[in-house]
Image (cartoon, helix red, strand yellow):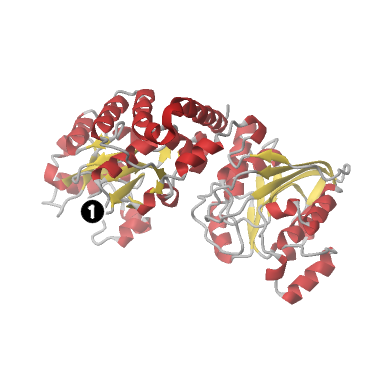
Amino acid sequence: MSVSVNPDSVVKGLSAYYTPATLADMLAQWVVRTGSERILEPSVGEGALIDAACRQAQRVQEYPGVHFTACDINPAVIETIRLRLGTRSEARAIDFLQLDPASTGLFDGVLANPPFTRNHSLDPHRRSVLRKRFDTVGAAGLWVHFLFHAMDFLRPGGRLASIIPASALFSDYGRAGLQRVSNRFAEVEIREIVDRPLWVNGADERGALLLADGFDQGSSHLPEPCRWSAHGIPAALLPISAAAYDQLADQCTPLGSIASLSIGAVTGCNSIFLLNEEQRRALKIRKSDLQPMVSRARHIPGLTIDKAKLLRLALEGEKTWLLAPKWLGEKGSGVRRLLAKISARRRASTLWFKKRTPWWKVDSGGSSDAIFTYMNDRGPRLVMATADVRCTNTLHCVRFLEHVPADQRLAASLSLVSTFGQLAAERLGRSYGGGLLKFELKDARKFPILPAQRDLRSAFEKADMSLGAGDLAEATRIADEALLAPLLGSQWEQTIKRLRIEIDARREVRRGR
């Protein structure tokens, strides 16, 4: 495979709306059909489109051989991308509008999320030069020039897939530009995104997708847009319970307004720093040199976690001990023998080891009130933790603000289990490899928390027991009765059924069914 890009590894700010994975996947599915294409990415940014092309290539061919040429005006971006590209691909630090097709050859496809820089934001001289060069009219934004130039790089029969601003669908210059592109392709489809995508940089902007096939093999009229969800679902097929969802959302508080969220402990080498009880005993490491640690979502199946539960998991073979000695002990001690498995080269090349003094002393962080699960299939959970429990950076630490009462904290945990919370997760979460929902810190901070209408202790304990027994449906019923019924009134059960239909539809699409 030619590349694997971490979507959070590249940062730039050039009027860019970094591509959500769902939109990137739609574009990639249009362009990548054999798994052996030559693909041009004219403004690679944080690499989401290349990631999506790789995923799609692996779906259609067992041993894909996609060749990328990635461009970006930001040299720092290219340095990062270049490290991740295979030998059959290349990255160029260049303004795409200055790239010459003679220097690259022609491509099977172009995958693009061009800058949305508006016409009035361009330097006047540059605006004049671009207008003459591409023969554009009106207030054409930079994305128009990008698309016109991109067509010069396509072989006959090639494909183009690009994100465009929503304004392109109704502005005179936008429609003129799209018609000009349509004139060069045998088939064109435009998908209007009916909800706001969760842009990776948090921008508040709707968008649309331009999908074109058969370059210079026919001419198309500008099609009417078809309506799609930002989650990759045709709007006509997606049951939308907007009124009920909005009614509840209007009464919610973002989690980030009642709690602070942070990453968990970073070990730098989980295979060494995390142990189970059998390993601890074999090395004769004292419990005082260890810290109870949650490192997997499976360690917290319910709504509560404490040291005793983690110790039972360690006895069952789960790595729920963090190596956290105050000193290394005598020569030949278990702590020293364990740490000796990390080579000097590994220590020198691991960023987190170089940040720490001494390198082996992991900062397990302060106590947290709860743990927010990071990667999920059926939505995240907020698990209440005792003060002696920590988590690794595969989960998020949550500390409630001092003024937040106990019932509101329980409401926060129950909110994520409720039908409303599960739908909020499908709308807010980012779909990643394997169809899982991922919640970065900034996503988790936005999660809507329902108000506490009454004493929730009994409902919380029952939901905790149900989840611990693997019965999510019963836990959800308990949370719905405690939190949603008081807000929705006598018809609450019928309203919840409508919300559930949308949840099921979104999950089926996310899971690739």
Total labels drawn: 1
Asked whether 283 or 263 is in front, the reply is 263
* Residue at left offset 62%, top offset 55%: 44
* Residue at left offset 24%, top offset 37%: 305
Quadrant position of residue 152 = bottom right
Crowding at dot 1, Cα within 10 Å, few <14 / some 14-19 / many 20+, comes out as: few
The percent coordinates of residue 234 (x first, y second) are 66, 34
Q: Which quadrant is the N terminus positioned in?
A: top right
The percent coordinates of residue 287 (x first, y second) are 13, 42
The percent coordinates of residue 123 (x first, y second) are 70, 74
Query: Furthest-right residue in view?
Result: 218
Asked whether 474 or 283 is in front, the reply is 474
Quadrant position of residue 132 = bottom right
- Asked if residue 512 can be seen in this view, the reply is yes
Q: Is residue 41 above or below residue 503?
A: below
Q: Is residue 229 above or below residue 258?
A: above
Asked whether 148 or 176 is in front, the reply is 176
Asked whether 118 or 155 is in front, the reply is 118
Q: Amino acid at mark 1?
A: Gly
The percent coordinates of residue 336 (x first, y second) are 18, 49
- Asked if residue 294 can be seen in this view, the reply is no
Q: Which quadrant is the C terminus positioned in?
A: top right
Local SS, label 1: loop
User: Which residue is tagged 1?
Assistant: 366
Q: Is residue 318 above or below residue 195?
A: above
On the picture, is 252 further left or further right than 336?
A: right
Query: Furthest-bottom residue in view?
Result: 125
